[in-house]
Image: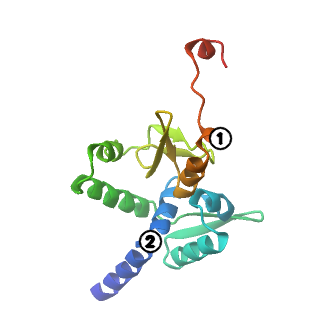
Amino acid sequence: MYEKIFQLQEEVFKILANQKRLEIIQLLSNTSLSVNEMVDMLGLPQANLSQHLSLMRRAGLVKITRVGTKVYYQLTDQSVAELVFRVRDMLTTHENFDESVRQYFNQPTELYPVAKDVVCGMRVSVAQSNFRSTHNEQGYFFCASGCKDTFEKNPSKYAVKKHTHKEAINGK
């Protein structure tokens, strides 16, 4: 019996041992998404994403829900996301990152504060986001690497304009 449990754990950890699949888990940690929504967020071709999702589905990590003609993916159990975040937290605590990186990751583990990914519009937890960029001294958080890469290719397209005090008062 114990051998069977160890074999199952090994299979799950093999599936988790991939950066894009870890990103998928992070994306699905608080919502369900369609393949089309995830393609741009992850910066992956649809065929590659479908392969990752298929492996994760066979391992029991994700499940699908059909709404009309759309198929949405979600985690089968939230504890998988919690495991991924705990491992990340453990690594950031014990690795020798410089202070700026440590400060970024040593946020409270709650879902708040929440930021809006300026590329796709998804609301992301600052504490759980692994993707951040700075433009004109302003920090931006992203749901996944694809959105961050898109932002960094043309930040002025997505950057939030800083308003002067007078503009803020006048509602501009």
Residue at numbered disc 2? 18
Residue 154's x, y, as percent?
A: 61, 46
Position in image of residue 52 (x %, y %): 55, 74
Residue 17, quarter of the rendered image: bottom left
Q: CA distance from mark 1 to mark 2?
A: 31 Å
Mark 1 Cα-neighbour bin, 10 Å: few <14, some 14–19, many ≥20: few
Callout 2: SS: loop
Q: Quadrant of the N terminus?
A: bottom left
Total count of labels: 2
> Residue 165, which numbered label?
none
Observer-nearest of 8 and 165: 165
Q: Secondary structure at mark 1?
A: helix
Q: Amino acid at mark 1?
A: Lys
Residue drawn where x is 57% and y is 17% of the image: 164
Which residue is labeled 1 in the image? 157
Query: Within the image, what quadrant is residue 41 found in?
Result: bottom right
Q: Mark 2 is on which residue type?
A: Asn
Q: Is residue 89 left or right of residue 80?
A: left
Q: Is residue 11 above or below residue 97?
A: below
Q: Residues within 10 Å of mark 2 (few under 14, many from 20)?
A: few
Quick check: 84 left or right of 29? left
Q: What quarter of the picture does the C terminus occupy? A: top right
Residue depicted at 60% across the width and 11% down the height: 166
State the residue lying farthest toward the right. Answer: 69
On the image, the x and y values in percent for residue 36 come to 68, 62
Vertical arrangement, residue 105 with respect to residue 91, above or below: above
The answer to which of 152 and 64 lies nearer the viewer is 152
